[in-house]
Image (spheres, grey):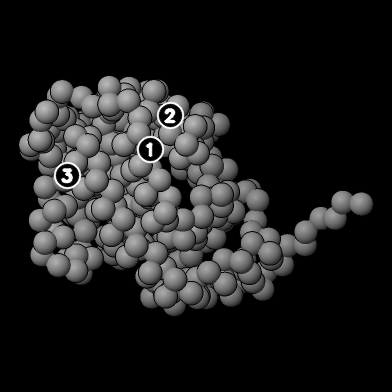
Amino acid sequence: MMTTEVIVEAPVDELKTLVARKVMTTERTILPFADFTGFMTDVFKTFYKSGCCLVGAGHVTPEIEIAADRAEIELVEALGASPFASDVASVLVAVKSPHDLIYISNPNRITGANYSLTDLEKLARAIPQGVMFVDEYYFDYYGITGFPLLDILTNVVIIRSFTAAYGITSSDTGYVLANPSMIDLIKHSCQGRPLSSTTSNTILSTLVNEEAVTLRLREIHEESLRLAKALSRLEIQCRITTADFIILRVASPKNVGNYLARCKTPVENLDGYPQLKHYLRYRVQSVSANEGFIEAFKKMPVDYYQLKSTDHRTVTIRRPASDFREKSDTQDIARIITQDSYPRR
């Protein structure tokens, strides 16, 4: 016989208390949600005004496309000259009404492009009667946040994940940070599935384990650098990001993807996205899994991945100085993300 899980408020209240303590805010500014796509559909509907559109600052994920479609709101992707760099000007050009909505994942979930706090404030002020949604899915990796804007602007909504820092991609749970009046409006208008007691308790157990997060973030940083160096030696252009993935440029994303799939190494083909021809994205994993990824490239046909050309489009990568343990690391990262030269056969 099937049973229905009972929804109780106690774990959710405890969850909000813990988040409030970590973020150093009040519980009135926090709203947990269980499903990202469903939640975004509801908030887009809530803040939509006739004639406005949703402007995506850079590439958007399929989840946002689905949410915009369900909310019956026009989505416009504002892409600059480089998909790896922030471009405030292109977003401002796409804004046609003070009632428009802006969605920005910072860093970008597809390419890792990122915006500064000054950039975010400028974009929010461009839509005084609209709302700017700042998706900080990778906040724990990135460290720069739009949270200070909540003290000076009323049209900013911060969205974060409960599980991204742990590499848990099967969960779509998260929480919103906004001023209390905005939280009340969202809470009363959104009919998304609430967090269950089981989910809340699971999240609670992970949030209190700060040491595990610290160790994971350090490993991701070190492994990203190691992967980039190894791939560069194979003459593969790669870009590290302020997230848990690296992006690599190969001759045939399809052939490389199929070969890696046979090696049980998953990658995402970005070739179909605008401006991302020849690109793949690899989510950094354990040391052993990453070593298997490198070895697979060493064994596959060279013509699958080697390109004669280099993509010199601009990269912006902002990361707190404390993340770099040694000067040599910073120099290596700068060399890898610019990729000005390669050894040639």
Please rate how many residues cluster around mark 1, counting C-alpha atoms within 10 Å: few if below 14, some from 14 to 19, many from 20.
some
Q: Is residue 17 above or below residue 141?
A: below
Residue 117 left/right relative to 283? left
Q: Residue furthest left?
A: 341
Q: Is residue 35 above or below residue 19?
A: above
Of marks 1 and 3, which one's residue comes earlier in the chain?
Answer: 1
Please rate how many residues cluster around mark 3, counting C-alpha atoms within 10 Å: few if below 14, some from 14 to 19, many from 20.
many
Q: Which residue is mark 2?
A: 259
The percent coordinates of residue 228 (x first, y second) are 24, 46
Q: What's the residue type where badge 2 is placed?
A: Tyr
Of marks 2 and 1, which one's residue comes earlier in the chain?
Answer: 2
The label on residue 161 is none
Which of these two is toward me, 77 or 62? 62
Q: Is residue 140 above or below residue 313?
A: below
What element does badge 2 sit on? helix
C-alpha span from label 1 to label 3: 22 Å
Q: What's the residue type where badge 1 is placed?
A: Ala
The label on residue 296 is 1
Residue drawn where x is 51% and y is 29% of the image: 69
Quadrant for residue 194, please give it: bottom right
Total marks drawn? 3
Residue 330 left/right relative to 133? left
- The quadrant of the image that shows the C terminus is top left
